[in-house]
Amino acid sequence: MNQNEKIPARGWAIVWIAWLAFMVANLSNFAFGVILPDMRNDIGFDLETAGLLSAIAWVGKGLLTIPIICFISKGKPKTVLFAIFVILGFGMLLQGFATNVTMLFVGRLFVMGVAAGIVSVLVVFKIQWVPKEKLGSINGVEMFTGPAGQMLGTAAFPMFLAMMTGWREVMIVMGCFSLILAVAWLFVAKDKGESQSNYEKVPVLQPLKEALTYKNTWILALAWPMTSLTWIAVYTFWPTYAVESLDLSIGQAGMVLGFLPIGSAIACLVSPIMAQKWGYDKPLIVASGVVLPLAYYSLMLTASVPVLSVATFVAGYAAYNFVPLAFTTLYKTDMSPRAVSMGTGFIFSLVGLGGAAGGAATGWLGTQYGLETALSLTCITPIFFAVLTMFLTETGWKAEQKKQQEADAPLENKPA
C-alpha cells in the first residue's frame, strides 16, 4: 500500500459498526456508577454487592477475551464478531428486565465479557482494510470511541434517564441497538482478498505464543492493569462518595465525572499526533503513570465543582494519553496479524482483571474503612505503571530511524 492509498468505503463501514458496538458497551458499563443509587433502591443490595457487580464485568473481560480470540484462529472473525454483538445486546436486555441481583450479574458479565473482544478481533479486519501508515490515527479514533461511550455513560446518562422513565428503559434501548448492529454486520463485514484461506491453517495457540515472544506485550500486560484498577474504582464509587461526603448532587457528580472521558477522548486524538511530531512514544506513555496518582487524589481534597472538573479532565487525559500509542507498538513489530490480535487480547485480559480488582477491593475497603480511604489507596497504583513502562522498547519513528542508521553504518564504513 502506498502513502496516498485511502481506506475503502467497506473498510470504514466495518470499523464503524464495531466502534459503535464498543461505544455502546462502554456506555452501558460506565453508566453503572451514575445509576447505582437508583439500582440499589430498585432491586436492593449493599455497597459490597455493588463492588462485586462492578468487578464481575471486569472479571468477564479478563477471562473471556483470549478464548474469544482463539475462535478466530480457525478463520471465523466475521462470525465471532456477530456473536459478540448478539451477546452484547442480550446482556443489556437482561439488565433492563432484571428482577434480582443474579440477572444483573449475568447481564454485566455478558456485556463486558465480550466487549474487549470487539477491538481484539477487529484487528484482523483493520490489517486487511486499513493502509499501514494510517493505523496509528485509526487506533486513536478507535480508542476515542471508548471514552465517548464513557462520556455518555456519565455526563449524558442523567439526561437519558430524564428522557425515559428510568435506567431499565435505557438499557433496553441500548440492547436493541446492539442487535441492529449485529444484523448490519452480517451484510457489511467481508474478508479482503485471499487472506481468509491463510488464517484457517493457523493453530489455535500459535498466535499467542508468537505475541508473548515480544517484550512490549508482557510489559503492557503487567503495567496497564495498574491504571485500570484506579480508573474503575473512581468510576464506580466516586459518585457515591461525592454525594455522601462532599454534599454534591448526583447530577453534579455525573457532570464532574463526565470530564474524565472528555479528557480521554481528546487524548486519543491528540497523543498520536504529538508522538508523530516528536518521533518518540515511550516518554508520553510513562508520563501518564506520573500524572495519574496526583490527578486522582485531587478528587478527595475539595468539594469545588470547577476544581474537581479540572482534576477529572487531567486524569481522563492522562488515563488515555498512552492507550493508542501502546496498542500501536504491537503493530510496529513483525508480528503476524493473528499475533497482533492475540497480543491485544492478552493485554485486554489483564486490564480486565485490574478493573475487577479495583471494583472488588474498593467495595470491600469502603465497607471496612470508608470510601475516602478506599479511593485514596487506589490512587497509588498508577505509579507502578510508570515504573514498568520505562522498560518498553521505543517504537517511535525517530528511534526506528536511528536503529536503521546504526545498521547501515558498518556497510558505509566497509572498504570497497
Image (cartoon, rainbow, N blue to C red):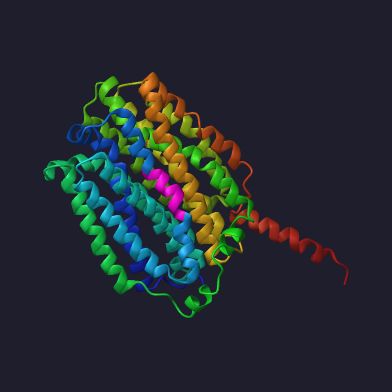
Corner quadrant of residue 243: top left
Residue at x 64%, y 43% (from the top left corner): 391
Corner quadrant of residue 32: top left
Q: Between residues 28 and 13, which one lies in front from this camera angle?
A: 28
Q: Quadrant of the C terminus?
A: bottom right
Q: Is residue 135 above or below residue 385?
A: below
- Tell me, yes or no, whether the highlighted magenta stretch contains residue 60: yes
Relative placement, left or right, of 70 versus 50 is right
**Residue 91 appears at what percent x and percent y?**
28, 52
**Residue 384 appears at what percent x and percent y?**
56, 34
Considering the whole magenta stretch, tell me its main secondary structure. helix
Corner quadrant of residue 158: top left
Q: Between residues 384 and 175, which one lies in front from this camera angle?
A: 175
Q: Between residues 232 and 75, which one lies in front from this camera angle?
A: 75
Residue at x 29%, y 30% (from the top left corner): 239
Q: Is residue 233 above or below residue 206?
A: above
Residue stretch in magenta = 57-65
